[in-house]
Image (cartoon, rainbow, N blue to C red):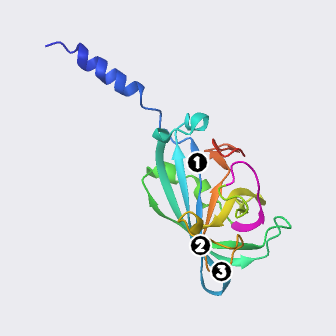
Amino acid sequence: MSTRPLLLLAGLTACGRPDTTPTWAYDPIWLEPAVQGEVHGFQTWELYGPKWIDNSDDRAYACAVVVELFGAPVACDADPGCTVAWELAESEIVSTDCDEATTADPLFGSLLRVGIGGLIAGEQVPYPGQTSTGWADYGNGWEVHGYAYPEALDLGALIDTTDWDGVQPFQLVPSQSFELGGEATSTPGTGA
């Protein structure tokens, strides 16, 4: 029996698999109202291999780190349009399928404040006219995180407001990704 067909099959299979060494991080955030204006939520750091930034191929998925967030209200001085913000008093990794060396990256605990407010427009906006700006402070001051909107819109509900109302959970979808150990960059498919 010849091993040549088996080697050819193994070679073809390996060629189709992208490198999944954690290189790029993308961090959607989900927030829900808590007592006395506080907020509770989860930041999911999705990690991808080096080629993901070129074409956002989900086969380049490496692993994820889920951080639970708790925050108290603070003034939102990010922009005149920013209406609500929270200082994150606690954050803790609650789930991961990454190895221990990857989860040791300080990036996963770097979110200090998060805010919502200021309508955002553009071709890539998830819900035109109903999407606000999401704000984040990773330790270098406020910056645009991406798009913020009521989670109910993803579930097909009709919502009258795009503002944080203290009732609706919100999705914050990033418009940039982070190179692990590097700088933030525009995320494929966001137009940002």
Q: Amino acid at mark 1?
A: Ala
Q: Earlier in the sequence, mark 3 or mark 1?
A: 1
Give the percent coordinates (x, y) of residue 20: 47, 38
Q: Is residue 158 left or right of 64 when viewed as pictured?
A: right
Find disc 1 in the rendering and name its residue: 25
Residue 59 is one of the magenta-drawn residues: no
Is label 2 in a helix, a strand or a loop? Answer: loop
**Residue 182 or residue 147, whichever sits in front:** 147
Pointer 3 local density, CA inside 10 Å: few below 14, some 14–19, many at least 20: some
Residue 120 is one of the magenta-drawn residues: yes
Q: Is residue 97 left or right of 158 when viewed as pictured?
A: left
Q: Amino acid at mark 2?
A: Pro
Numbered circle sitting on residue 169: 2
| Residue lying at 58% horizontally and 43% vertically, measured from the top left | 24
Find disc 3 in the rendering and name its residue: 166
Q: Nearer the viewer, mark 3 or mark 1?
A: 3
| Residue lying at 65% horizontally and 65% vertically, measured from the top left | 149
Q: Which residues are magenta?
A: 113-125
Q: CA distance from mark 2 to mark 1?
A: 23 Å
| Residue lying at 61% horizontally and 86% vertically, measured from the top left | 35
Give the percent coordinates (x, y) of residue 186: 69, 43
Pick out the residue farthest to the front: 158
Quarter of the figure with residue 130: bottom right
Q: Check if mark 2's residue and mark 3's residue have beta carbons within 8 Å.
A: no
